[in-house]
Amino acid sequence: MAEFDLEIAREMADSFSAAGGVCCRILSGRGEVLYRTDGSINECDYLRSLPGEAPVCRDLHFRGLSEARRFGGRYIYSCASGLTYFSAPILCDGALAGGLVAGPVLMGDVDDYLDDTIEKRCVPAGDVRTLFSFFAALPQVDPAKLRHLSTQLFANAVYISDSSRELLHSRNSEAQQRSIGEYIRQVKMGAQSPDYPIELESQLFFAISKGDKPTAARLLNDLLGHIFFFMEDPSAVQSRIAELLVLLSRAAIQGGAPAQTILDITYRYMQELQGLRGQEEVAAWLARVLGRFTDMVFDMVDSKHKNVIRKAVNYVSANCGRDLTLNEVADHVGYSHSHFSKVFKEEMGCGFRTYLNQVRVEKSKGLLLSGEMSIAKISQVCGFGDQSYHCKVFKKMVGVTPDKYRKQSRRIDTDREYARTK
């Protein structure tokens, strides 16, 4: 069985416990407790000592580690007595070598735990004071803090592991599956059209070409959700994935990545695609491809500003729906206004205002094709302020007005859109 450095693990457990105020134990790959930061009485031993039938929690924490590995490196769970724990696996040579388990913590009031235990175990009155002291000594955390603590425990486990890349990939895969699942849920509720959302491909192309990884990842997950839900033929799914791969590569080239390098990588990826099986494997693989291509867009050998530009692009993507100025973005990245304007134009090939309008136009194109908002409302949502300015900018960049672009799509009843009567 693979082993990890116990001394390093103890240091990480002690640091987590001191910083978070929560007991942390180290488990072996077989589930034995190798170390515990809190020298006080074990909570299980105490609860089993109470009158009444004690719940059996054998292998609880080892199952927690197994679930943590399966669910992306973190897992929050409760024991039969209602106490909350969270765990993170330690991987060595790709195998589960052990893990960190933190807890117990209380997710509610002490009195609630006290009353529940007294009722279930028929605790004598003379033992109530001791039981109250036991619960009162445990940390109380709200859900938000528990998530932060769980993330920190995961980071400590990654530090101990020699297979940290696998843990990180597993966590990213979990987040991606949640995103895809959310899109499928919206489809089932009727919030998404069964027609293939070609407009999302256009937005995805633009996001990749500008190195906007967060937006590109979200759009890719929406497209994958649609493909996985509406396409049952495996060969048809693989064909559509191959088309997306080509789109990703063309977008990267459009964004300035070296064309021959991208084409060579794409050829290799096409060969890899043939050997993939299952939706989750395909989705995780395509997400890594997306990350590689978007990173290459910003892999500017002679540029000292790629991290600043990346930060600026992400900020624009998140805030383009409101009044946004170059000065605000410059302040966000820590550059003077004049220097940021110069750097942005050099690296992006266009001025800040032009780029901001490009982002807003791409966002408005998707909303126009969805048919859920009036054009006036879309103008406001996308940050144009008024419909006339939206129309002017849109026509300059797309070649037609928003009204004509929407009619050409044939996705909605234009008479109903403008409340006209026949």
Image (cartoon, grey):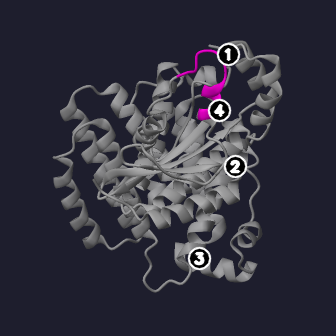
Disc 4 versus disc 2: distance between alpha carbons? Answer: 56 Å
Rendering quarter of residue 194: top left
Q: Position of residue 202 (x, y in %)?
A: 44, 48
Label 1 Cα neighbours within 10 Å, binned few <14 / some 14-19 / many ≥20: some
Q: Which of 32 and 317 is in front in this view?
A: 32
Circle 2 sits on which residue? 321
Label 3 CA crowd tier, 10 Å (few <14, some 14–19, many 20+) = some
The reply to whether the C-beta atoms of the residues labelled 3 and 1 are less than 8 Å apart is: no
Residue receiving disc 4: 46
Marks 4 and 3, Cα distance to the nearest angstrom?
66 Å
Alpha carbons under labels 4 and 1: distance apart: 13 Å
Q: Which residue is drawn at 66% across and 18% down?
A: 51
Question: Is 48 rendered above or below residue 71?
Answer: above
Using a 10 Å C-alpha cutoff, classify the residue at mark 2 as few (fewer than 14 neighbours), some (14 to 19) or many (20 or more): some
Say whether residue 216 is magenta: no
Q: What stretch is highlighted in magenta?
A: 45-55
Mark 4 or mark 2: name the one nearer the start of the chain.
4
